[in-house]
């Protein structure tokens, strides 16, 4: 593990391998450990930077709200410290929102973008209400909220099949401090729509969705890449493609990285 500082806040990250830089950004209630087997695979041909996002894993909280722009600026700080000029960003869920904010703020750094179970669209009014409910729920009963939230990310069939995996994800999620959870929910709630980036940026892009994703409506997310050059892959499972469809996802990501 390596550390740097962003606005006097400790940032935790790993730096593995050599070659074209790939930056891995985890999702809400996750940390960089979600990428362990991917780091091992990608670092054979690439330099892989995995970062604990603000208020998650070994990275401290910055404030009451962590906007996607705050998170993107923090990622930029890590790359700046490492003298990295160009990178392919792979973001899972919230990590995808942050990758999009980074692409908008630091376009010259972008070599490629993968949105994994993520979207370029802002929260709907209904989703914003759900974020507020989530904030109230986690303040009321932290453990119950985290345990319930994790199970709900998998497709229904996999909630029974992948019990051990789900328990491991829960264990990691329960390391996330209350402030980190609230700050992320507040930040996701106010994030802006960045669909325009899917249409008017020149770097290679890939969107990966789960057909039974309980969080993101499949058809609605698919519509955001109509008339774009964004590559697309779909799986039959839920929001946790990196666990639910691990082998197939690795094949698709390696194929995406290879020509860049």
Image: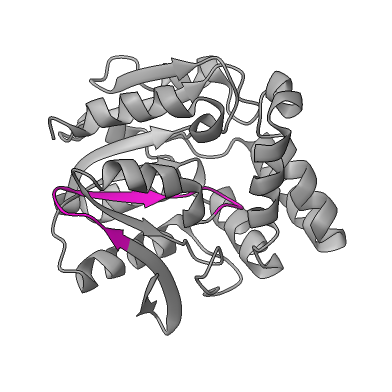
Residue situated in front as seen by the camera: 32 or 184? 32
Task: Determine which quarter of the picture holds residue 186.
Answer: bottom right
Count of marks overlaid on the render: 0
Q: Position of residue 28 (x, y in %)?
A: 57, 50
Q: Quadrant of the N terminus?
A: bottom left
Q: Position of residue 260 (x, y in %)?
A: 13, 35
Q: Is residue 218 above or below residue 140?
A: above
Residue 192, visible in the rendered structure: no
Q: Position of residue 57 (x, y in %)?
A: 54, 64
Residue 137 colored magenta?
no
Q: Residue at x 58, y 31 (%)?
A: 239
121 to the left or right of 179 = left
Residue 27 colored magenta?
yes
Q: Residue at x 28, y 42 (%)?
A: 42
Residue situated in front as seen by the camera: 168 or 31? 168
Q: Residue at x 71, y 19 (%)?
A: 157
Q: Position of residue 142 (x, y in %)?
A: 80, 59
237 to the left or right of 45 = right
Q: Residue at x 27, y 55 (%)?
A: 105
Task: Determine which quarter of the picture holds residue 55.
Answer: bottom right
Q: Which residues lie in the magenta part?
A: 15-30
Q: Is residue 240 above or below residue 107?
A: above
Residue 125, visible in the rendered structure: yes
Colouring chosen for the image of the structure: one colour
């Amino acid at each position: 593990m390596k550390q740097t500082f962003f606005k006097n806040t400790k940032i935790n990250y790993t730096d593995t391998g050599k070659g074209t830089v790939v930056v891995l950004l985890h999702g809400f209630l996750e940390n960089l450990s979600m990428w362990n087997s991917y780091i091992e695979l990608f670092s054979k041909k690439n330099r892989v930077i995995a970062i604990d996002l603000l208020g998650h894993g070994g990275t401290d909280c910055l404030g009451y709200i962590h906007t996607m722009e705050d998170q993107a600026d923090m990622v930029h700080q890590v790359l700046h410290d490492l003298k990295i000029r160009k990178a392919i960003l792979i973001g899972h869920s919230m990590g995808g929102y942050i990758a999009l904010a980074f692409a908008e703020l630091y376009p010259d750094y972008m070599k490629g973008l993968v949105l994994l179970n993520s979207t370029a669209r802002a929260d709907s009014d209904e989703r914003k209400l759900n974020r507020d409910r989530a904030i109230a729920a986690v303040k009321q009963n932290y453990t119950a909220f985290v345990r319930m939230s994790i199970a709900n990310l998998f497709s229904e069939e996999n909630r029974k099949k992948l019990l051990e995996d789900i328990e491991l994800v829960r264990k990691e999620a329960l390391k996330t401090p209350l402030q980190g959870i609230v700050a992320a929910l507040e930040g996701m709630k106010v994030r802006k729509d960045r669909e325009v980036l899917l249409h008017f940026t020149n770097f290679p892009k890939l969107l990966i969705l789960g057909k039974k994703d309980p969080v993101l409506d499949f058809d609605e997310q698919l519509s955001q890449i109509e008339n774009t050059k964004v590559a697309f892959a779909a799986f039959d499972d839920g929001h946790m493609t990196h666990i639910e469809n691990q082998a197939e996802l690795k094949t698709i990501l390696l194929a995406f990285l290879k020509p860049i």
